[in-house]
Image (tube, helix red, strand yellow):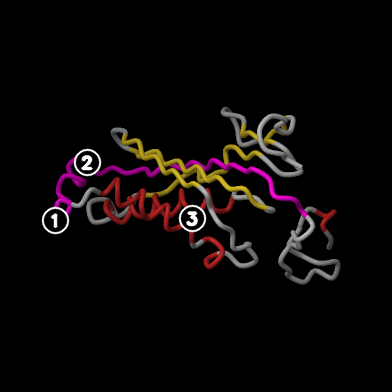
Amino acid sequence: MSEHSGFTHLDEHGRARMVDVTAKPLTHRVALAKCTVVTSADIGHVFAQSPGGMNVVEAARVAGIQGAKQTATLIPLCHPIRIDRVAVDVTIGPDHIDVSAVTEIVERTGVEMEALTACSIAALTLVQALIASDPEASIEDLSLWHKSGGRSGDWVRASDDTTLTRTEPVTSGPSTE
């Protein structure tokens, strides 16, 4: 296996390795991940009954931010990076909660895993609040929706399917090489 096979974390002998990014330039990189928490619980009622008046949505945001910062500890072979921005958004619907996370860095490697981790940890925090009322609460469709920066340029998930499409690299702002 090699980088050309698509498995960048395996060497030519199929052994796990951390990708060498030492020669790559620093570039501005952004990633967006989304997921949905699905539940049959009365979300508003459950969240209103939180112990000590804890705001479950704010707890989920903080958990997501902390999760992004811990990505390299949680996921083998992920580079430890300095994260410049994490934003977690939570939108409550009647039977679901939409969660999105944006991560942003100026670094030698991407920030996609940090966005996915932030999104999933925020969603897990929400499920934890719902699980007593709805043991079947679930997290669905955790996906990367957008990434920009670096050598590969921009990628955007088509909204009507799960296909990532490549767009031209960003040419304004910080270098994307």
Give the number of the mark in front: 1 or 2.
Answer: 1
Q: Position of residue 106 (x, y in %)?
A: 62, 48
Q: Give the mark, 3 or 2, whose residue is nearer the N terminus.
A: 2
Nearer the observer, 26 or 143? 26
Q: Position of residue 34 (x, y in %)?
A: 49, 41
Horizontal placement of 141 versus 9: left or right? left
Nearer the observer, 169 or 52? 169
Q: Give the mark, 1 or 2, whose residue is nearer the N terminus.
A: 2
Q: In what element is the residue under mark 3?
A: helix
Residue at the spot 23% in from the left edge and 56% down from the top edge: 132
Occupied quadrant, residue 121: bottom left
Residue contact at pointers 1 and 3, CB within 8 angstroms: no
The stretch in magenta equals 24-53
Q: Residues within 10 Å of mark 2 (few under 14, many from 20)?
A: some
Say which quadrant the C terminus sits in: top right
Horizontal placement of 166 versus 46: left or right? right
Horizontal placement of 48 versus 34: left or right? left
Residue at the spot 63% in from the left edge and 62% down from the top edge: 79
Distance between mark 3 and mark 2 Cα atoms: 29 Å
Q: Position of residue 60 (x, y in %)?
A: 34, 50
Residue, disc 2 = 42
Residue, disc 1 = 52
Give the number of the mark in front: 3 or 2.
Answer: 3
Residue, disc 3 = 68
Say which quadrant the N terminus sits in: bottom right
Q: Residues within 10 Å of mark 3 (few under 14, many from 20)?
A: many
Distance between mark 1 and mark 2 Cα atoms: 19 Å
Name the amino acid type tagged 1.
Answer: Gly
